[in-house]
Image: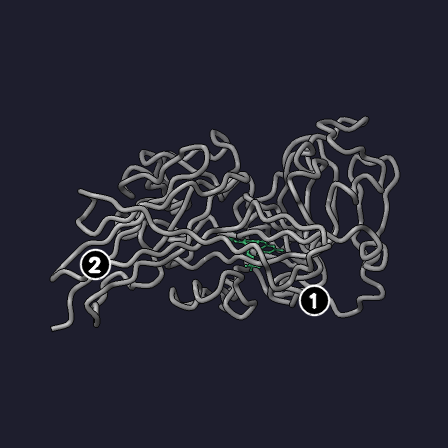
């Protein structure tokens, strides 16, 4: 049986630029990648609890104010392989590169919903709608051959400050097929699973989406839960991702070929929280040094007069040390709400292997 296409770039490539080029942007699919090629006839339907169902063409979406949002999209399964080493988990294996930082261009969902009669900053619609569901064109086995879907609260969908986009551009170019052509949702600060690609329908619904990836996956369980005692309904679907960072200039076990070793990587937090600090230890966590951080402000795909937000974007970090004989290097980030990454993976182990945000450790040996 053929598996869906999944890919992540090498560590070094991931941090070679602040904006991740499309070629280096990870790809995560749950079914075959659909082809939507008749753009003239393509429509996104907006319905559910709406009194009047509406179909929007790309032309109509292009006419709405175009926003650019520089946001890091991260799969909840990023760093799963390392979690699996602590104790086996179920899921696609990822190193530290199941994320990317792109400038997305498109219409704000809040503007689109206003166009169809739902005011900005609504928590509940006149007919009782409290969630907005995104339904895709692709079909996956987890949905028994039905489309991939997810939802977010109406409050978030209608809040212009949450920067939820119906994106038709990625890094200044037309979105490509792998990433959701012709239209995808971008929900900044939230695990990638909610950013539905190849959008077919938007439904206003009463309760959150009952789809597999909301109710039977992408939930964070405590370490005590296993496949025999799991009760899926006891947990909420994961939305915001927690503070995360990883070293990308070094592999898990590496050799320092020079006297100095460069420790560089990315740090990012969810929910619009920025990165306050990245701490590096080269003595297994006894002492720490703060890394330099860089968050680029002059971005290649954004003209100065364009509507742009970058509060959802990662920061790159860097620190340089003398290379001792044999060391463990650790990185941990702190976000603007003072949330810190947990020290050990065991304390956050969960059977689906999501949200491994434990301190990132690599081992370095001097070349002999
Ligand atoms: N949307 C659809 N239609 N089908 C999918 O399989 N995968 C989700 C999300 N949106 C998915 C989807 C998951 S789990 C992630 S992490 C992101 O898309 C990955 O987006 P990317 O492939 O553009 O990097
Ligand atoms: Mo994902």
Taking the image as shown, residue 121 lies to the left or right of residue 30, namely right
Ligand 1 shows up in the quarter that is: bottom right
* Residue 80, horizontal then vertical, whole percent: 37, 52
Q: Residue at x 68, y 61 (%)?
A: 169
- Label 2 C-beta lies within 8 Å of the nearest ligand 2 atom: no
51 up-or-down from 192: above or below: above
- Quadrant position of the C terminus in the picture: bottom left
**Callout 1: helix, strand or loop?**
strand
Q: Residue at x 72, y 54 (%)?
A: 306
Badge 2 is on which residue?
Answer: 363
130 up-or-down from 243: above or below: above
Taking the image as shown, residue 273 lies to the left or right of residue 208, namely left
Cα–Cα span, label 1 and label 2: 41 Å
Q: Quadrant of residue 151?
A: top right
Which mark is first along the chain, 2 or 1? Answer: 1
Out of 257 and 122, give the one closest to the viewer: 257
Q: How many marks?
A: 2
* Residue 356, horizontal then vertical, whole percent: 37, 46
Residue 239 visible at all: no
Badge 1 is on which residue?
Answer: 174
Q: Kindly identify which numbered label has been placed on residue 7.
A: none
* Residue 5, horizontal then vertical, whole percent: 52, 66
């Amino acid at each position: 049986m053929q598996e869906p296409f999944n890919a992540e770039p090498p560590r070094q490539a991931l941090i070679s630029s602040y904006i991740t080029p499309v070629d280096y942007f990870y790809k995560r699919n749950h079914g075959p990648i659909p082809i939507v090629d008749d753009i003239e006839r393509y429509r996104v339907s907006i319905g559910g609890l709406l009194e009047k169902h509406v179909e929007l063409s790309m032309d109509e979406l292009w006419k709405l104010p175009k926003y650019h949002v520089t946001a890091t999209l991260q799969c909840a399964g990023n760093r799963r392989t390392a979690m699996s080493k602590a104790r086996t988990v179920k899921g696609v294996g990822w190193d530290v590169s199941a994320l990317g930082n792109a400038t997305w261009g498109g219409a704000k969902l809040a503007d689109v919903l206003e166009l169809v009669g739902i005011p900005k900053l609504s928590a509940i619609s006149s007919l009782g709608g409290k969630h907005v569901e995104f339904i895709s064109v692709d079909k996956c086995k987890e949905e028994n051959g039905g489309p991939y879907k997810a939802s977010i609260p109406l409050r978030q969908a209608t809040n212009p400050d949450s920067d939820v986009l119906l994106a038709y551009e990625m890094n200044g170019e037309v979105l490509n097929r792998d990433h959701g052509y012709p239209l995808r949702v971008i929900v900044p600060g939230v695990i990638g699973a909610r950013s539905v690609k190849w959008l077919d329908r938007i439904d206003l619904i009463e309760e959150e989406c009952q789809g597999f990836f909301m109710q039977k996956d992408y939930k964070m369980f405590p370490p005590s839960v296993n496949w025999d005692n799991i009760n899926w309904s006891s947990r909420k679907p994961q939305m915001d991702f927690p503070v995360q960072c990883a070293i990308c200039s070094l592999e898990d076990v590496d050799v320092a070929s020079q006297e100095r070793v460069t420790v560089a990587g990315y740090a990012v937090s969810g929910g619009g929280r920025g990165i306050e600090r990245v701490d590096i230890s080269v003595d297994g966590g006894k002492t720490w040094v703060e890394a330099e951080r860089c968050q680029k402000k002059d971005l290649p795909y954004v003209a100065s007069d364009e509507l742009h937000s970058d509060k959802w974007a990662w920061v790159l970090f860097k620190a340089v040390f003398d290379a001792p004989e044999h060391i463990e290097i650790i990185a941990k980030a702190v976000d603007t709400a003072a949330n810190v990454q947990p020290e050990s993976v065991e304390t956050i182990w969960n059977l689906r292997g999501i949200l491994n945000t434990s301190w990132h450790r690599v081992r370095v040996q001097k070349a002999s």
